Image: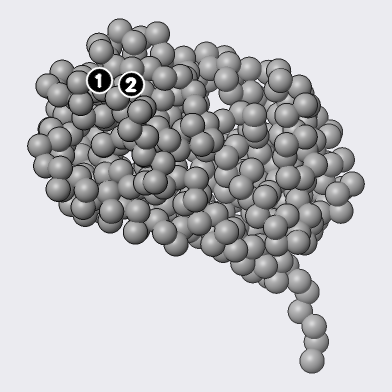
């Protein structure tokens, strides 16, 4: 099968869309298929694409106003040319909004089926960074996804949201996790001593430091006795957060085995963003054997079993976050039980298993497009 993955971002950009696109491309190669990635150009140039598992075509782009880490693709004929020259059987649209619209147009023009993956709260992004209304963003989302043969939602909450906004032909496709890289065995006592020299409980957040993540909700956790807050990531909110979270350790952006070591060395993982369509960092914390505190909204509702693998709290409630952390801090046995159950929960959610489900979705779409043969 020849697949073109049109993605709004791709490594070396690090975010959920890029990570999922990379894992999808790797799995297709592993299963003997031929993917091609089309993505916005980045300032880093074409060099890092040599590490990709398949060819990558870059199209011209500009930084998103107010959030330069995100690139916005410019109109380009390269998308249609790339799809045609790859002799694609199917076009995979990863979180389509700008470049994905061009990908959908290319698929339509060439008579190819398209699978659209909904992955980001683009309505929230539009409201926060582009200065346009959420309703306008949803109109665009609906027009793109309605043209696709199939839309894949990463969580039950995202699926309901899409259906509520009139998107047809939606099915569930969650995200995988690298259970070899992220595992309890990477716990590093030397790192723990460096971060918490007085034996404090390590409470961590991993992700973008951006307004929609509401990392400032950790402020009351910083005030808990015997607790050390660790923040991993970068983004436009970092200067404000260093002021809002007194005493927190800001470790910057970390990746790969270094990130896995930090995850496994935490005692509690806290995610604060209320707009997650999935929330990959929650799943990575669970794979690392760490109990989770997360908002009872969006993707975490599917991931966190309240009272078994972690605690779900009221969204955007700093006091609820603090109280949940305080509860876990006071009960080492509960933390250990939640962490073990979290690891057990994600054991079967490997990228290989999730990738095979995606290929099944591809096969269903291709089968539906195949003309019926008269008896």
Question: Closer to the camera, 319 or 351?
Answer: 351
- Is the residue marked by circle 1 packed among few (<14), some (14-19), or many (20+) residues within 10 Å? few
Return the x and y of residue 324 as percentages of the image width and height.
16, 36
User: Cα distance, mark 2 to mark 1?
Assistant: 6 Å
Q: Dividing the image into 4 quarters, which one contains the N terminus?
A: bottom right
Residue 358 in view, yes or no:
yes
Q: Dividing the image into 4 quarters, which one contains the C terminus?
A: bottom right
Return the x and y of residue 184 as percentages of the image width and height.
37, 46
Q: Residue 211 occupies which quadrant of the picture? A: top left
Dot label at residue 197: 1
- Is the residue marked by circle 2 packed among few (<14), some (14-19), or many (20+) residues within 10 Å? few
Scheme of image coloration:
one colour
Residue 144 in view, yes or no:
no
Dot label at residue 194: 2
Q: Is residue 362 above or below residue 367?
A: above
Evaluate if marks 2 and 1 touch, with contact meaning CB atoms under 8 Å apart.
Answer: yes
The residue depicted at 70 percent of the width and 62 percent of the height is 31
Q: Is residue 220 left or right of residue 340?
A: left
The residue depicted at 49 percent of the width and 50 percent of the height is 180
Dot label at residue 125: none
The residue depicted at 57 percent of the width and 40 percent of the height is 19
Q: Residue furthest bottom?
A: 375
Q: Is residue 232 above or below residue 148?
A: above
């Amino acid at each position: 099968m020849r697949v073109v993955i049109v993605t709004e971002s791709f490594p070396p950009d690090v975010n959920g869309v890029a990570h999922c696109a990379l894992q999808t491309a790797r799995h297709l190669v592993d299963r003997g298929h031929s993917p091609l990635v089309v993505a916005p150009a980045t300032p880093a140039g074409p060099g890092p694409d040599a590490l990709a598992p398949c060819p990558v075509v870059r199209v011209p782009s500009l930084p998103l106003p107010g959030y330069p880490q995100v690139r916005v693709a410019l109109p380009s004929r390269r998308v249609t040319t790339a799809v045609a020259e790859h002799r694609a059987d199917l076009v995979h649209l990863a979180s389509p909004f700008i470049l994905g619209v061009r990908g959908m147009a290319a698929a339509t023009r060439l008579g190819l089926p398209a699978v659209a993956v909904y992955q980001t709260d683009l309505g929230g992004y539009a409201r926060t960074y582009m200065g346009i209304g959420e309703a306008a963003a949803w109109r665009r989302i609906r027009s793109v996804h309605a043209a696709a043969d199939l839309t894949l939602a990463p969580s039950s909450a995202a699926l309901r949201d899409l259906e509520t906004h009139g998107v047809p032909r939606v099915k569930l496709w969650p995200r995988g996790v690298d259970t070899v890289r992220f595992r309890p065995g990477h716990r590093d006592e030397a790192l723990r001593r460096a971060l918490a020299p007085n034996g404090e409980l390590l409470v961590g957040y991993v992700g973008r430091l951006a307004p929609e993540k509401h990392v400032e909700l950790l402020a009351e956790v910083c005030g808990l006795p015997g607790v050390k807050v660790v923040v991993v990531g970068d983004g436009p909110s970092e200067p404000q957060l260093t002021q809002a979270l007194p005493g927190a350790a800001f470790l910057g952006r970390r990746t790969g085995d270094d990130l896995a070591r930090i995850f496994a060395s935490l005692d509690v993982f806290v995610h604060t963003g209320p707009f997650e369509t999935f929330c990959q960092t929650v799943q990575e914390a669970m794979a690392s054997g760490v109990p989770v505190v997360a908002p009872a909204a969006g993707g975490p509702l599917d991931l966190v079993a309240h009272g078994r693998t972690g605690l779900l709290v009221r969204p955007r409630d700093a006091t609820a976050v603090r109280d949940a952390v305080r509860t876990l801090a006071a009960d080492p046995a509960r933390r250990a039980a939640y962490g073990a159950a979290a690891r057990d929960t994600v054991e079967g959610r490997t990228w290989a298993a999730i990738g095979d489900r995606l290929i099944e979705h591809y096969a269903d779409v291709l089968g539906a497009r195949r003309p019926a043969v008269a008896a």
